[in-house]
Amino acid sequence: MGHFLPSSPEERQKMLEALGLSSARELYRDVPDSVLLNGLLNLPEGLSELAVAEKMRGLAAENKQYKRILRGAGAYDHYIPSIVRYIPSKEEFLTAYTPYQAEISQGVLQSIFEYQTMICELTGMEVSNASVYDGATAAAEAAGMCKNRKRSVTLVSETVNPEVINVMRTYLYGAGTELKVVPAKDGRTDAEALKEMLSAETASFCFQQPNFFGQFEDAEKFIAAVKEAGAMVIMHCNPIALGLMKSPGELGADIAVGEGQPLGMPLAYGGPYLGFMATTKKYMRSLPGRIVGQTADADGNRAFVLSLQAREQHIRREKASSNICSNEALCAMTAGLYLAAMGPAGLKEVASQCLSKAHYLAAELAKVPGVSLAYSGEFFHEFVTVMPKAQEVLAALDGAGILGGLPVEGGLLWCVTEKASKADLDETVRIVKEVLA
Amino acid sequence: MKLIFERSKPGHALTILPPLDVERTALPAALLRESAPMLPELSETELSRHYTELNKQVYGVNDGFYPLGSCTMKYNPRVDEEMAALPGFTGIHPLAPKTATEGCRKVLELAASLLEEISGMDAMTFEPAAGAHGEFTGVLLIKQYHDARGDSARRKIIVPDSAHGTNPATAAMCGYEVINIASGEDGCVDLESLKAALGPDTAGLMLTNPNTVGLFDPNILEITRLVHEAGGLCYYDGANLNAIMGHVRPGDMGFDCVHMNLHKTFATPHGGGGPGAGAVGCKVFLAPYLPKSAMLDEPGHCQVRSFAGNFLVVVRALTYILTLGREGIPQASETAVLNANYLMKGLREIFTPAFDRLCMHEFVLDLSDYKKETGVSALDVAKGLIDFGIHPPTMYFPLIVHEALMLEPTETESRETLDEVAEIFRKVAELGREDPEYLHTAPHKAPIGRPDEVAAARSPILRA
């Protein structure tokens, strides 16, 4: 059996004796006899490090690692620079708690302050929090920020990732308020339907840019209408696309949220990921979660602290803006590190390569007889194809070590990142051709 | 320390991407951003130095004693990190076909079965990404249960005044009215207050046991019986599970659902404030209400996070549980309790325990008398400890103890360390008597002195 106790059984016995006890069981004398366990739990026997490593490696080996992943839908396979993978594994960053004791936590605090700054730059907003759990909970928390007694209805576009909509619905069910889905038309938000659904009860409208189908929403067309109706605009955006596309700040959104996973976090079967949230100064005090602020110590040295804590659960209890406590601090630091490693030119280039390679694959696939693109609008690095024998195509690609597009209503949702080479994409097209021939 | 933006030099960069090998696509001008984001420009050397410098200004569990009460800062085994970094786990797309994710699903199934056994529950979800997120999920189970029965009168959740702030905040997020009940003089639930609060409007009770003063509530079976009798359900906040693993189970105490902090009890690291994982377990009658990911399973279920949650945290926790096994799990808990009692004994002569009796995995010191005598507060003592190279305990929590310092040494500390720590507390206490001013302005040896938090809140500077 393995353990991590820095004491021997003899030492522990002596400690018990020092307490006037003869056995460890006496430590549990407040536990009612009827529920105090007598035997051991039905757990396996403990393992040595070598044995447990073998066991876990065996489990990992039961997964299939594709040589190329052409699937996104909320989780994106970007290249992670080596230094971005290495630095967060430093033990101090890794094993510290939330930085309550600022004097010995300046490294964590500063890394979050830098992250907040970069998120503000990326989104064009004024204030960022220190992160929430993921992009879906970020959208749900944002919807919560917008509601009040008079305005309690949240609108969300059907073109938002279904996982995000589902999480929003769950959070709003908790709060006992309504979520209404604005229908899509040709793969984008139906702006006319949205305008009809806006009312004096609308708290906010949430849309995704680029949307779940990869399409760019014609955001300028409906943002003004939402604001005119007195509701707030929540823009759920892809952080890599922000290297190129108009930011939430430029579009006049009130809250920017998104899934930060593309900024240096592996796919990892869904997590840990990172929810980013940024807003304007006006709504700063209703943001959920930690926020790091700059101040000074008595000697005038620059210092960072957890700030605006009057919003938070440990002070406000049932009146807090959210119950969030632990967030995704290490992922936030990773995102900051990724953005610093890429730099302004690097981020723009990643975005441009994703865009270009996705368009190359889309164009080549559309040349294959029987294959067409489901939607005609501008897109970023995801697009939907309509083709016969989609399951056979996916199976053939799978056989070649390629994870093809995700089956969604209406076709296959493909995603191409900078990791895919022209050769990978040509091979993909060749296989599709063969299956459909 | 310089900000990363202050290190930036035009043209400094890493070489990450190959040249583009297809024709470059341009977006229409209307979609393009007007101003480029101000991101720093650094070489890899500069980047490495910057974060290394930041890392030196962080105190982690590997640095030394970290008795942050309620946070279970135990040692985080390196092998857990290595397993979580296996490409066979990190490279798996959450929406890959089931045939390609056999290993990931086995990890979740195995971890679920082990945690069900430890907690005495029947079913489990790993969607919640942190403890508070687990609380939210657990209380949503309660809400769905009452709603499904059409029992809409149950609008209140009962929370003891000693609870973590996340408990009342969670209940409020789920649309419940929060009924705070006073603790008895012994720090445990006051049965009369509980009885008075219970009624046909009771949706449930949120409770941690051992409670936040580190005591196992001996009336626990009576408490859960009373709540059930009133038609409410019992939620177990697993924040303090590290005290009892393998000795007593929340499921046997009468709880209907529970969250477990994998980042505390099961040795996965805190990362300076996350990522964690708040696995939620429940009894079989609540299992139909557990969240299920929309795309992984049929839609329409409640879902609290995208995909399967913080999967790599589960990998770490599973590695840990498999290492300890059936004998190691209870041994970890009883050693945590032993260490807490041993340390309390060592400190009893220096500061007053809030409850001077056998404790579980943590205990609370009450520095009210010491403050009266010296003018030195719990905050001053905490800051003074920093100069002696240890992390301060949790301060001013729980709220029911004034001038509280809450210590949780965990099982991964040696007797020598605990003896040394008692000696450090003695020195700090003496220092407070001899030179209170020195402690009022402590720490003196940390990278910075006490920051001005009032100024930070009054005129917020939240970005560079």
Image (cartoon, rainbow, N blue to C red):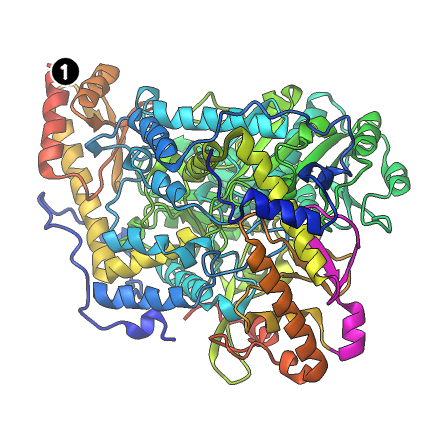
Using a 10 Å C-alpha cutoff, classify the residue at mark 1 as few (fewer than 14 neighbours), some (14 to 19) or many (20 or more). Answer: some
The amino acid type, in three-letter code, at marker 1 is: Leu
Relative to residue A419, is residue A87 drawn left or right? Answer: right
Residue B358 magenta-highlighted: yes
Residue at position x 18%, y 54% in the image: B16
What percent of the width, then of the height, locates residue B347? 70, 62
Q: Is residue A362 visible in this depiction of the protein? A: yes
Does the stretch in magenta take in B94? no
Q: Residue A40: percent from the left, percent from the top?
A: 60, 26
Q: Position of residue B151 (x, y in %)?
A: 76, 25
Question: Viewed as shown, does residue A408 lie left or right of A66?
Answer: right
Front one among B367 and A365? B367
Residue highlighted by disc 1: A436
Position of residue B85 relative to residue B108, above or below, is: below
Q: Is residue B277 left or right of residue B257?
A: left
Q: Secondary structure at mark 1?
A: helix
Residue depicted at x 29% and y 61%: A340
Nearest the viewer among A146 and A40 is A40
The quarter of the picture where the C terminus of chain B appears is bottom left
Is A30 rendered above or below residue A120?
Answer: above
Q: Is residue B254 left or right of residue A75?
A: right
Q: Residue B299, relative to residue B267: is it above or below?
A: above
| Residue B459 in the image: above or below residue A424 | below
Instruction: Out of B164 and B328, give the one closest to the viewer.
Output: B328
Check the residue under mark 1 and report the chain it is in: A
Residue interval drawn in magenta: B348-375
